[in-house]
Image: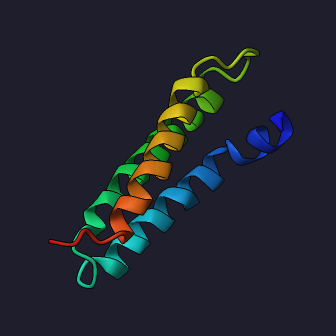
Amino acid sequence: MAELIGMLYRTIPLTVGGVVFVALFLAFRRAQRHAHYLLWPAAAWFLAALDEWYMNTYQPEMNIRVDMLPFLAVMIMTTFSCVPMAFLRRRA
């Protein structure tokens, strides 16, 4: 499991994940009324990518990566909560 997280928690996959959420927002913004919820996970994925880029660029000798835990938690919470809110319709 740790190897999978280590493989996915890199700058390029995180940036691609953020771009996917922005593309979904742009595709569904006219059809879905609540498509703006997709921007929250996009922002979380972009912030995690920015943190990963910073750590690889300016502190590559870091061995223990405690800084990725809050970003990983925010990414998981926003992805699993905002994606269903964007696509589920509430009846009036």
Q: Is residue 77 left or right of residue 61?
A: left
Whether 73 is drawn above or below 76: the answer is above
Q: In this rendering, would 14 be left or right of 50?
A: right
Residue 44 or 61: which is nearer the viewer?
Answer: 44
Quadrant of the rendered structure where residue 15 is? bottom right
Q: Is there any visible trace of residue 46 in the rendered image?
A: no
Q: Position of residue 35 (x, y in %)?
A: 29, 68
Task: Tell which residue pokes out farthest to the bottom in this image.
Answer: 31
Residue 89 seen in this snapshot:
yes
Farthest residue toward the left?
Answer: 92
In the rendered image, residue 78, in percent from the top left (x then y), is placed at 43, 45
Going 57% across and 20% down the picture, which residue do you hit?
67
Q: Is residue 70 left or right of residue 8?
A: left
**Residue at the spot 39% in from the left edge and 54% down from the top edge:** 82
Q: Position of residue 90 (x, y in %)?
A: 25, 68
Of residue 90 and residue 2, the one placed in the foreground of this image is 90
Looking at the image, which residue is at 47% across and 40% down? Answer: 77
- The answer to which quarter of the image holds residue 44 is top left
Question: How has the structure been colored for display?
Answer: rainbow
Q: Nearer the viewer, residue 2 or 48?
A: 2
From this view, report whether residue 39 is shown above or below residue 2.
below
In the rendered image, which quarter is residue 64 located in? top right
Q: Residue at x 77, y 38 (%)?
A: 6
- Say if 58 sits above or below 43 in the image: above
Q: Where does the N terminus fall, quadrant-wise? A: top right
- Give the total number of marks visible in the rendering: 0
Residue 41 pos. (x, y %): 42, 51
